[in-house]
Image: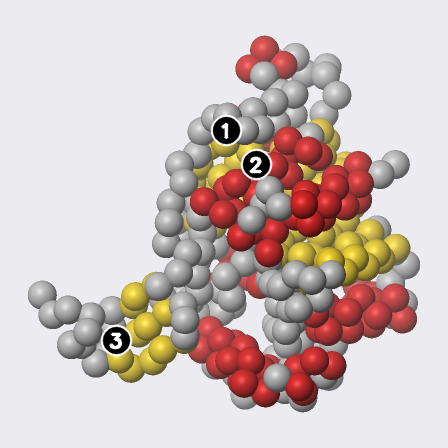
Amino acid sequence: MISSSKREVSHEVPPYLRVYKDGTIERLFGNEVAPAGFDLQTGVVSKDILIIPETGVSARLYRPPSVTPTHNQNHNHNKLPLVIYFHGGAFFISSISDPKYHNSLNILVAKANIILVSIDYRRAPEHPLPAAFHDSWASLQWVHSHVSGAGTEAWLSDNVDFGRVFLAGDSCGSSIAHHLAIRVGPSNPVEGGLNILGIIMIHPYFWGEEPIGSEAKNPVRKAMVDGWWRFVCPSDRGNDDPLINPVADGAPSLSGLACDRVLVCVAEKDILRDRGRLYYESLVKSDWLGKAEFVEIQGEDHVFHIIDPNCEKALKMIQCLDSFINQE
């Protein structure tokens, strides 16, 4: 076997991934695995299930300590909000079993008292975009099957209030959540009995060809992020492709978002911060009839809450998410 140091590299996305000329893909980050199960810190229980057999897409389901097996059998108990979550990783690294995501979502589920489904969409470059968007749409359809009773997952059928469903994600997962809400729209049949009440966008990975805000002051980092997108989605629109720039010319109108509320969270030191702010400001100025909220955490960088979910500012942000989900 030829060592990685002797094989020729055809493409590199530093510091995360290498593609070798023999077709081998080496991920240098986000490879750790945390098993599903009982979490001692929070009392949350999780499990992994295959949800789209045709493509192999799976999900990790989370259940808060307020729900017990006996509780599950009582169909008259108060049902809980559902959060459908899309992890970050620029579409090419990380997974639902990443310990950092697993630990962070355990804390969110316990704090907000929710059922959560974390989607393991297929990643680039093995599955170039828009595969992740197609997988996420199929996953939303799978969740929707439980509204009519056709779904087979008891954690959803027995415990979820399908009138209180939230799409959520961090980084590229925010982009997925946005596009699903656009695709659902006001007349899509997925809305029958499945009410997408809100979207939670944490450090959203949106971008564009022309630099804005702090991007102009950091051309090296701007070029790095440019390269990420071109790697996962070769497009003649480049970084103004509507999949990554929701306010670009030709992008679907933000007024078509299928939800009543949106929360946009950014971090002060994040190169993506100004894109998140632009999305929020554009949404407020659009004809969308819902309510948008904007939160900026000072002194922190991209997905700091995933890296250290127990730090003071991460817990403060989790409190914001809890309040957004459970507001009357």
What residue type is disc 3 on? Tyr
Q: Are marks 1 and 2 in contact (CB under 8 Å)?
A: yes
Residue toward you, 20 or 43: 43
Mark with earlier residue (1, 2): 1
Nearer the viewer's eye, disc 1 or disc 3? Answer: 1
> Crowding near pointer 3: few (<14 within 10 Å), some, many (20+)?
some
Looking at the rendered image, the quarter that the N terminus falls into is bottom left
Looking at the rendered image, the quarter that the C terminus falls into is top right
> Crowding near pointer 1: few (<14 within 10 Å), some, many (20+)?
some
Residue position for label 1: 39
Which label belongs to residue 106? Answer: 2
Residue position for label 3: 20
What residue type is disc 1 on? Asp
The CA distance from mark 1 to mark 2 is 7 Å
The CA distance from mark 1 to mark 3 is 38 Å
Mark with earlier residue (2, 3): 3
Q: Residue 152 location, x and y as percent? A: 52, 29
What residue type is disc 2 on? Asn
Q: Residue 194 location, x and y as percent? A: 72, 41
The local secondary structure at tag 3 comes to strand
Residue toward you, 154 or 232: 232
Q: Residue at x 52, y 40 (%)?
A: 103
Q: Residue at x 37, y 69 (%)?
A: 17
Q: Looking at the image, can residue 23 be seen?
A: yes
The CA distance from mark 2 to mark 3 is 36 Å
Q: Give the answer, above or below, for where 10 lies relative to 274.
A: below
Q: Residue 56 location, x and y as percent? A: 39, 49
Q: Looking at the image, can residue 142 be seen?
A: no
